[in-house]
Amino acid sequence: MKYLCLVYARETDLHSLPDSPEDSECWGYAEKLMDSGKMLAGEALEPVSTATTVRVRDGETSVTDGPFAETKEQLLGFYLIEARDLNEAIRLAAGIPPARVGSVEVRPIRQLDV
C-alpha cells in the first residue's frame, strides 16, 4: 500500500535546533529507502514564503501569496513510500530525520476510480 509522509516543522527551527538534521542525513535516509524499494518519490519544498494558494468559489478563482492557513509548522517536503501496512509506514516515517524537530503526517493514498 502507498502512504504519503508529509514532513512538517517550523522553517526557522529546521536547521537551528541541537537535534536538527543536516541535508546530507535526509538524503542518506531517502537513499536507504530507495535502495530498499520502499521509497517511490520524495522532495523537499522551497520556503513557505514562495507558496501560492489557489481557491475557486462560485466559479471565481482567487490567488494569494503564502500558504493556505496560518500554522506554527510548515509543510517542508514529502516522502511517497510503499509499506505493507500502517505499522510499517509509521516505522519508516519515524526514521525521517526532521521528525526529531517537527512531525510527519502519515496518510494512505486513496486509489481513484478513473
Image (cartoon, grey):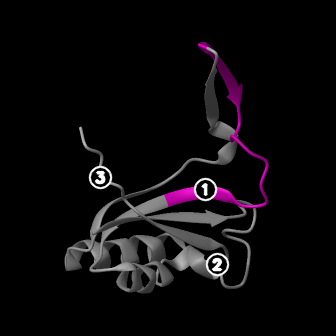
On screen, residue 41 above or below 53: below
Per the rendering, the mark at residue 111 is 3
In the image, is residue 97 part of the stretch drawn in magenta?
no
Of 9 and 18, the residue lying toward us:
9
Mark 1: which secondary structure?
strand
Question: At 52% from the left edge and 78% from the top edge, which residue is drawn?
Answer: 97
Q: Specify the amino acid type for callout 2.
A: Ser
Mark 3: which secondary structure?
loop
**Span highlighted in magenta in the image:** 59-77
Per the rendering, the mark at residue 20 is 2
Callout 1–callout 2 Cβ contact below 8 Å = no
Callout 3–callout 2 Cβ contact below 8 Å = no
Query: Would you identify the image quadrant in which residue 17 lies?
Result: bottom right
Question: Which quadrant: the C terminus?
Answer: top left
Q: How many badges with numbers are in the image?
A: 3
Q: Determine whether, in the image, residue 42 is placed left or right of residue 84.
A: right
Mark 3–mark 2 Cα distance, whole angstroms, equals 35 Å
Q: Determine whether, in the image, residue 55 is placed left or right of residue 40.
A: right
Per the rendering, the mark at residue 75 is 1
Per the rendering, the mark at residue 101 is none
Q: Specify the amino acid type for callout 3.
A: Gln
